[in-house]
Image: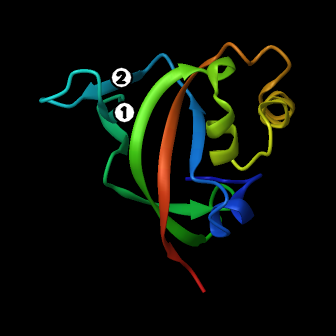
Amino acid sequence: MIFQYSWQAVLAKKKTQTRRIVTAKDTAVYAHDNHQEIEAVVSNGRTKWKVGQTYAVQKGRAKPKIARIRITRIRSEPVSEISSADAKAEGWDTKQGFFDSWQEINGKNSLNRQVWALNFELVEPTK
């Protein structure tokens, strides 16, 4: 996963959550025993993210891996519904700080976009 703007916070364990914009091709796969719990996101028949799987942390496209994270939870919501606790898990002190950064990266009218909120843990920092 690319963390172009926040890889330092991931390595410092200050960022344990990330939001990715839901695309028209994305589909949530729900747990068999709990139809409200998302266990994976599939796009074009390919698994993008799955709870329990590990993913490389990269500073940008085609950049080398600097760590690995494990997805621990997936949910979907509009960006504007982020809680204060989730803003902190995103690496920000306040919701407004998160919103300012989000809009700088994704555009002024992006707060109502539907996103995948991915919780993760750092499992392998690369030395």
Tell me which numbered mark, 2 or 1, is placed earlier along the sequence: 2
- Few, some or many residues within 10 Å of mark 1 (<14, 14–19, 20+): many
| Circle 1 residue | 41
Location of residue 19 with respect to 58 vertically, above or below? above
Using the numbered discs, state the Cα–Cα distance from disc 2 to disc 1 in whole angstroms: 6 Å
Query: What residue is disc 2 on?
Result: 27
Mark 1: which amino acid? Val
**Toward the viewer: 47 or 127?**
127
Q: Where is residue 101 shown, x and y percent of the image?
A: 83, 37
Q: Under tag 1, what secondary structure?
A: strand
Which quadrant does the C terminus fall into? bottom right
In the rendered structure, the answer to whether residue 72 lies left or right of residue 104 reads left
Q: Quadrant of residue 33?
A: top left
Q: Is residue 91 above or below residue 77?
A: below
124 on left or right of 42: right
The residue drawn where x is 57% and y is 53% is 16
